[in-house]
Each structure stands twice: as structure tokens, then as C-alpha cells.
């Protein structure tokens, strides 16, 4: 049985070539793609076409291994917390947008100390008044007591509540789903360890107020980067009310948690939302691996009777370790180094990042069931936690799902004049108060095959969402004809940028690009010098 250190080293080691090949063969089966473990030029592995693709053809359509919606986006886009499809009704989505705008107008009202000229002051004042007048109707929309015309043109699945009850937590900050199967999958795979439960059971907390940053990925629709690499830990911690509400302990116990763990979970989320919400995604990975390992143990226990258990009835630690190794496999090939080492961060920032990660892990560890922590201790260590976050830094894709209100507005525009006028009579004030750019669901995800795509400054493919792509899956389209045997490449950065700027941006991914375009431009620059 390896020591804890040896276990950590094994989790962080690159999986053996034969096991990687076997795993990628399963993942690419039937896809006209294959993963080469050595794509050449020191790039590591890469994704290759096994058939000719035409320009505009879909090369890959892939669901995430782990993904999340940024905290700020949760206030603006009500989506399934598992597959990120918009849920509820268009009325709910409008109600959410309008009530956010009303809240914002209220905040501006309070802040209105800055002197402004008379005309802009009165214009802003009348806009605010118009918004305030919609306050009650926005609530009616949110609670299904008011309908809008032609919303049946864009039907949305009804929201299925979280079985742990967190759908009622801080309004839009709890989780809800588009179907019973998404709700059940999320619960079984990770959410049972991360569920906050109903709001009324929670100790009071100023966390989750939405004021936290979202470490959004690059909006390029390609490789994403956490923007908040090393924000200082937020001053103080969330104020917690010590009081225990009637029946709370029993309910927490049903979720396998005590009051202390519940508070720790709350603090973990608060810390993530005020520093770098990518920690939320890392927690999903940890929860997934813990639950998968535990499930394997249970299965083995059933098959082997009690023979692999110690006298306490606990499974043998060697058996637990093997289960952890197996459960870690989906993520084993994705990570390349700890977060604070795998980017081009200067040493002081790297030290801050390490401390931030350590604080975050401490809070998460206190929130997890001790039974799981003691069965699988190697997973709950700083090197592994740092590697999971580093994996996102280098591999993640920005997750985006367009707001369905856009389709409703297009539908209204397409109506015959009289019908349109009648619709605007009712819906006009709401439509006028919608933001010019309707916010989609924004998040970040780790995708097993997409994360094998290497960068090129003149890529042959791009991550792109079509109108019909209504969930958080990654979609990769051919930018030009791609021949069988060619590597699928994406641009991780703005490829319009000049050579030096491109290279600077790519330094964050830990490499200097030597694609044909960079090589040609470097040569041209050299020739100009001489
Ligand atoms: C999303 S991963 C791509 C898959 C990666 N090759 C692997 O083995 O997992 C991004 C990493 O691949 C490597 N990479 C991607 N494009 C590259 C390029 N054009 N030149 C050198 N290395 C590259 C870098 O190490 C980068 O951090």
C-alpha cells in the first residue's frame, strides 16, 4: 500500500500510454476522430481527423466532464444546473431580467450623489421610474402569475427542483434542472456533496450575494482562461449565525452532513465567489471523484461480501486507494501542473495563488463527509487540488448558451403588423427594459476530447454555438476543409493580434507557438532586421 505522498504522486503522474490510448479509443468511437498521444513539435497529445471534413461541418459535439455557470451569470440566466439548458418559461426569464434591472435602478437611486446635467438627469430619472413601475409585474412574471404573448413560440422545459431543496436557496443561486434525469444525474454524480439545502435551513450569510467576481474564461469562444488568477483572499469571512433551526440537524443528517459541515460549505462558496469561482468547478470534480470511488467500493463490497473489509467494517485502505485511482481516470490525463506553476504568473502572484487554493481546499475539506475524506485522503491534498485548478487553467472552454429571449424577440418581429402591435401593447414595457445585449448562460467546462485540441494561430476549426445548440455541450466546426489525418487545431487567443502579443498571451498556456504562421512571421521580421 503506497504512502500518502506516493499516492499523491501517482494521481499527478501522467497515465500510462496504453491506458490513455484505451480511454481515448472509447471516447472517439464512432466520431471520425482519434487522439494521438504525440502530436509532434513537443505539443503533447492532439486530436486528429480520420475522415475528410467539409468547411462548416461539425467536427465534434461533446458534453462536459465537469462544468459550472459563473456566479454572476446565475442572476441573469435561469438554466439547468447540470446541462445548462434554459429552464422555466420565457416569462420567468423576462421577470428575472426586469427585476435585476429594477434592483440595479434602486441601487443607482441610492448612489445618485454625482452631479449630472439637467437633461440627462431627467432622462435617467424617467427611465428609473418606468423600471420601478414594472417591479410588481416582474414579480408576477417570476411567479407565473402573468403571461406574455407568443411565448409558446419558444417553449422551455419546466424547472425540476433539486431533491436536496437548494432550488429555493437565495432565489437564483440555488440549483434547478431541466428534467428529472438531469436532477438525478447531478445528485448522484456530485451535487449531494455540494447541496446547500433549502434557504430557511441555512445560517444567515452575506455570501452568495452575487457581488463576487466570476473568473470568466476568455470570451473568444475558444480556450478559456480564468481571469482572476491571484486575487487576494477576501477580507474577513462570511458572518454566520450560530442558531440552529428546528429540525435542521435531522435534515442535514439526511444529507449526510452536520451543522458544522453545512457552515463550512457555505463559507467555501462564499470564498469562491469573492476570490475565484473556478473553485466551484474544482469542487464538482472532487465530489465526482469521491462519489464514483465510493460507488466502486460499494459495488466491490456487494460482489466480494465482507472479505475486503477490515474488522471495523470499513473497506481496506488498499482497496479504497484502488477505487480512488479508478475514479480519478477521467481527469488523470487532463492536468499538467499546479495552478500556481502552470501559468506565467510572477513568483509573488504564484505564492498568493497557492495560499488562496490552500484556504479554499481547507474550507471544502471541512464541508465533506469525514467518512469520504478518510477513505480517499490523497484526493483532498493541496497538490491535487492545485492540479485540478491548473487543469482548468490550461484546458477549459468557455461555456455559453444563448438567451432564448432572443428567439422570442425575432419571432415577434416576424409577426404580421397587427399581431405585432397587439403583442407590443402588452409586452412593450418589459421588452424596453431588457438589456440591449441579452445575457446568455456563461460558465466554464472541462471536456475530455475538446481539451486535446492544440493551438494554431491559423486554426482549421473553432468552438462555435449554432442556434440549435441549446445546452452546455462543446461544438467544434471546421473553419475550412480538413483532410483525414490532419490535426484539428483551435485558436486559444485572438488570432487577429500581432505576433508578439499572440506569443505573450500563449505564454499563459506555457508554450511558445511554432505554427506555420508564427514561423513565417518570425522569419519575415528577422529578414526585415537584416
Ligand atoms: C488544451 S491542451 C491541448 C492538449 C495537450 N497537447 C495535451 O497533451 O493535453 C493545451 C496544452 O497543449 C500544449 N499546446 C497546445 N498547442 C500547442 C502548440 N501550438 N505548441 C506547443 N504546445 C501546445 C500546451 O502545453 C498547452 O498548455
Image (cartoon, rainbow, N blue to C red):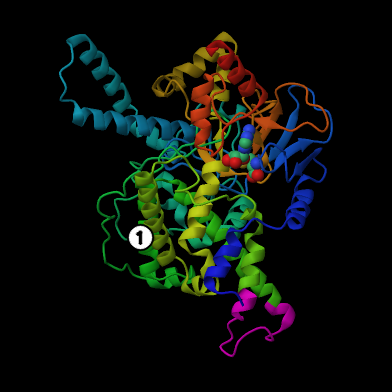
Figure quarter occupied by ligand 1: top right
Q: Quadrant of residue 466?
A: top right
Q: Is residue 311 magenta?
A: yes
Residue 336 or residue 207, whichever sits in front = 336
Image point (49%, 29%), residue name:
504
- Residue 411 coordinates in the image, percent (x, y): 59, 19
- Residue 443 coordinates in the image, percent (x, y): 51, 39
| Outermost residue toward the bottom in this view | 311
Image point (65%, 74%), residue name:
298
- Dominant secondary-structure state across the stretch colored magenta: loop
- Tell me the residue that label 1 is attached to: 202
| Outermost residue toward the front in this view | 530
Image point (38%, 61%), residue name:
363
Relative height, residue 354 to residue 212 (above, below): below
Q: Which region shows up in magenta?
A: 301-320
Image point (33%, 41%), residue name:
211
Residue 76 or residue 286, whichever sits in front = 286
- Residue 214 coordinates in the image, percent (x, y): 41, 40
Q: Is residue 424 visible in this depiction of the protein?
A: yes
Residue 426 or residue 528, whichever sits in front = 528
Amino acid at each position: 500500500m503506497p504512502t500518502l505522498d506516493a499516492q499523491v504522486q501517482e494521481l499527478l503522474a501522467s497515465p500510462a500510454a496504453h491506458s490513455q490510448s484505451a480511454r481515448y479509443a472509447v471516447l472517439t468511437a464512432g466520431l471520425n476522430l482519434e487522439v494521438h498521444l504525440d502530436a509532434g513539435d513537443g505539443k503533447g497529445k492532439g486530436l486528429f481527423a480520420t475522415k475528410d471534413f467539409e468547411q462548416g461541418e461539425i467536427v465534434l459535439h461533446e458534453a462536459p466532464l465537469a462544468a459550472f455557470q459563473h456566479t454572476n451569470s446565475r442572476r441573469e440566466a435561469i438554466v439547468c444546473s447540470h446541462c445548462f439548458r434554459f429552464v422555466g418559461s420565457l416569462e420567468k426569464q423576462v421577470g428575472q431580467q426586469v427585476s435585476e434591472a429594477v434592483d440595479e435602478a434602486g441601487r443607482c437611486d441610492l448612489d445618485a450623489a454625482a452631479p449630472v446635467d439637467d437633461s440627462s438627469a431627467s432622462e435617467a430619472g424617467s427611465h428609473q421610474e418606468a423600471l420601478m413601475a414594472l417591479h410588481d409585474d416582474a414579480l408576477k412574471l417570476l411567479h407565473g402569475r402573468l403571461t406574455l404573448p407568443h411565448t409558446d413560440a419558444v417553449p422551455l422545459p419546466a424547472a425540476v427542483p433539486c431533491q436536496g431543496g437548494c432550488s429555493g436557496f437565495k432565489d437564483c443561486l440555488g440549483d434547478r434542472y431541466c428534467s428529472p434525469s438531469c436532477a438525478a444525474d447531478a445528485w448522484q454524480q456530485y451535487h449531494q456533496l455540494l447541496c446547500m439545502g433549502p434557504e430557511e435551513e441555512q445560517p444567515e450569510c452575506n455570501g452568495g450575494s452575487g457581488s463576487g467576481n466570476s473568473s470568466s474564461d476568455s470570451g473568444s469562444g475558444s480556450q478559456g482562461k480564468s481571469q482572476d488568477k491571484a486575487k487576494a483572499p477576501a477580507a474577513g469571512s462570511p458572518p454566520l449565525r450560530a442558531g440552529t433551526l428546528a429540525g435542521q440537524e435531522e435534515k442535514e443528517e439526511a444529507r449526510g452532513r452536520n451543522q458544522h459541515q453545512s457552515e463550512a460549505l457555505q463559507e467555501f462558496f462564499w470564498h469562491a465567489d469573492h476570490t475565484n469561482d473556478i473553485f466551484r468547478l474544482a469542487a464538482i470534480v472532487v465530489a465526482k471523484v469521491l462519489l464514483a470511488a465510493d460507488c466502486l467500493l460499494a459495488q466491490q463490497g456487494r460482489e466480494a461480501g465482507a472479505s475486503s473489509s477490515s474488522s471495523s467494517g470499513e473497506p481496506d485502505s488498499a482497496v479504497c486507494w484502488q477505487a480512488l485511482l479508478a475514479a480519478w481516470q477521467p481527469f488523470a490525463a487532463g492536468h499538467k501542473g499546479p495552478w500556481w506553476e502552470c501559468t506565467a504568473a510572477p513568483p509573488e502572484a504564484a505564492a498568493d495563488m497557492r495560499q488562496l487554493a490552500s484556504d479554499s481546499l481547507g474550507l471544502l475539506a471541512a464541508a465533506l463527509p469525514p467518512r469520504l475524506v478518510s477513505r480517499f485522503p490523497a484526493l483532498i491534498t493541496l497538490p491535487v487540488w492545485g492540479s485540478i485548478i491548473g487543469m482548468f487553467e490550461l484546458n477549459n472552454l468557455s461555456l455559453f448558451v444563448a438567451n432564448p429571449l432572443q428567439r422570442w424577440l425575432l419571432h415577434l418581429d416576424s409577426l404580421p403588423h397587427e399581431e405585432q402591435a397587439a403583442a407590443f401593447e402588452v409586452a412593450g414595457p418589459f421588452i424596453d427594459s431588457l438589456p440591449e445585449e441579452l445575457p446568455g448562460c456563461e460558465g466554464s467546462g472541462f471536456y475530455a476530447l475538446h481539451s486535446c485540441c492544440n493551438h494554431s494561430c491559423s486554426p482549421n476549426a473553432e468552438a462555435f454555438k449554432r442556434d440549435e445548440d441549446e445546452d452546455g455541450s462543446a461544438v467544434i466546426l471546421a473553419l475550412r476543409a480538413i483532410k483525414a489525418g490532419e490535426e484539428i487545431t483551435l485558436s486559444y487567443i485572438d488570432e487577429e493580434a500581432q505576433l508578439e502579443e499572440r506569443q505573450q498571451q500563449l505564454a499563459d498556456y506555457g508554450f511558445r507557438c511554432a505554427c506555420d504562421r508564427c514561423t513565417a512571421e518570425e522569419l519575415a521580421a528577422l529578414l526585415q532586421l537584416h
